[in-house]
Image (cartoon, grey):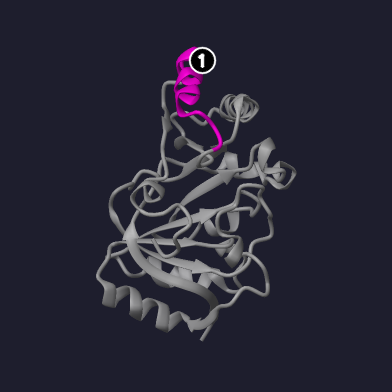
Amino acid sequence: MPKYKVVEIFESINGEGKKAGQLALFIRFQYCNLNCSYCDTKWANSKNSPFTWMSLEEILSLAKEKRIKNITLTGGEPLLQTDIRSLLEAFSKEKQFEIEIETNGSVPLETFRNIENSPSFTIDYKLPESHMEEYMSLENFSSVHRNDTVKFVVSNRKDLEKAKEIIEQYSLIGKCAVYFSPVFGKIALPSIVDFMKEHHLNGVNMQLQMHKFIWDPEEKGV
C-alpha cells in the first residue's frame, strides 16, 4: 500500500478559487521543488520538514470520516509525492468527493489527465517577482479545461503585465478559470482593479485570500 509524506490535514473553508467560502478538507504534503520569494508555506517545503507517513487507505478513511465533499491536495507540491497517481485514482472512485490539486506550475499534468473522474487542477503560474518563472511547464496550458484554474500571484505592475501576456498568448479566458491573487500586503489592491479596467480583462477574477482576513495571516491549519 503506497504511503505519503503528510505535513498536516485540516478542515476549513476554501480561502480562494472557484469554491471560495465552501468547506474543504486540506491535505498538505511535504516538499516543494520551488522556492518562491513570497511563499507562505516554507515550513512544509524542504525535505527536512516534519511529516507523518500516511497510507493511501488511512488518507481515504480519514476523508470519509470527515464527511466533507471538497478535498484539496496541497503542499509543498503534491504531484511530486511518490505514487500520487494511485491516491488520485483511489479518490476518483469515491464519487462523493470533488478533488482539487494545487500545483506550482512546474509539473507536467498530461500524465494525470486520463484518470477517470479526473481531479481539477489549480495551476499557479509563477510570475517574475516569484523568481521561479523559468521553471514553469508551459505545455500545461495546452491541456487546461473548464474544471481547471490558472492563478497568477501578483506582487506589482510588472507581474500584472506578464500575467496579461500569458493569458493572451495561451487564450486562457474561456478555456479555464483565471484569477489574479495579490501577494498579501505587497501590492495596493485598487491597482489590480485599475489594471483590469485599463485592459478590459473580462473573464479574469480578482480574489483575496479569505483565510488571511479571517485569521492571522501567519496562522497554520486554517
Q: Is residue 9 in view from this perspective?
A: yes
> Which amino acid type corresponds to the residue marked 1 in the rendered image?
His
Q: Is residue 118 in view from this perspective?
A: no
The rendered magenta stretch, by its main secondary structure, is classed as: helix
Give the farthest residue toward the right. Answer: 134
Give the farthest residue toward the left. Answer: 67
Q: Which image quadrant for residue 168?
A: top right
Taking the spot 65% from the left edge, 43% from the top edge, the residue there is: 139
Residue 153 position, x and y percent, is: 55, 39
Taking the spot 49% from the left edge, 82% from the top edge, the residue there is: 54
Residue 12 position, x and y percent, is: 33, 61
Give the farthest residue toward the bottom. Answer: 1
Taking the spot 58% from the left edge, 39% from the top edge, the residue there is: 142
Local secondary structure at mark 1:
loop
Q: Which residue is mark 1?
A: 199
Residue 132 appears left or right of 114 = right
Residue 105 in the image: above or below residue 49? above
Residue 203 position, x and y percent, is: 41, 26
Taking the spot 59% from the left edge, 30% from the top edge, the residue there is: 163
The reply to whether the magenta stretch includes residue 194 is yes
Which span is picked out in magenta?
A: 186-200
Name the foreground residue: 184 vs 7. Answer: 184
Residue 197 position, x and y percent, is: 45, 15
The reply to whether the magenta stretch includes residue 215 is no
Residue 120 in the image: above or below residue 25? above
Residue 71 in the image: above or below residue 185? below
Q: Quadrant of the C terminus?
A: bottom left
